[in-house]
Image (spheres, rainbow, N blue to C red):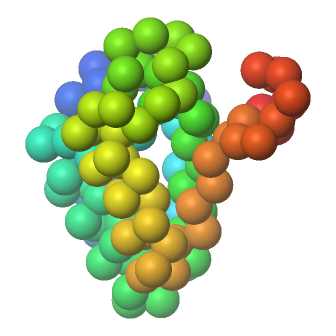
Amino acid sequence: MNLQLLSPTEYVKQATKLTHSATRRISLLTMVVADQESTHDLLEAIKAAAQRGVEVHVSADIFTYGELNGNFLGMGYARQAVRRTSEMARTLRQVGVKFTWLGHGRITLFNGR
């Protein structure tokens, strides 16, 4: 097997391409995912896949919120990007994506991951 380290831009590009061609199942596990210009095409492809009957699972770590807020433990909802990301998760669920926030509602930072 020939493994290759991809830049974030190339990863999103390849993931989008693969999502468009998926016929049975998509599983995406990520530390950070947000509704941003760079991920728009991927998110649209994920929604389209779910709507055409592909089983789609997306798991993202709640550290996404800390990253968007600019600090590691800032899980608040102050910034517009944070609100868009919460809306992204709701929209994905509405079209049939099984979306899970890893670490949500856990006692320690390590539970649920």
Direction left: furthest residue: 37
In the drawing, does residue 113 fall left or right of residue 102?
Answer: right
The N terminus - image quarter: top right
Direction bottom: furthest residue: 52
The C terminus - image quarter: top right
Report the front residue among 74 and 24: 74
Q: Residue 54: x, y in percent?
A: 49, 80
Residue at position x 35%, y 39% from top?
82
Residue at position x 26%, y 38% from top?
81
Q: Residue 60: x, y in percent?
A: 56, 42
Q: Residue 103: x, y in percent?
A: 73, 36
Q: Residue 24: x, y in percent?
A: 54, 78
Look at the picture and state if 79 lies above or below 44.
above
Residue at position x 60%, y 68% from top?
98
Look at the picture and state if 11 lies above or below 63.
below
- Where residue 9 sits, quadrant-wise, is top left
- Where residue 38 sits, quadrant-wise, is top left
Report the front residue among 94 and 57: 94
In the drawing, does residue 39 fall left or right of residue 89?
Answer: left
- Where residue 105 sits, quadrant-wise, is top right
Q: How many marks?
A: 0
| Residue 64 visible (yes or no) | no
Residue at position x 44%, y 10% from top?
71
Report the front residue among 107 and 23: 107
| Residue 7 visible (yes or no) | yes
Direction top: furthest residue: 71
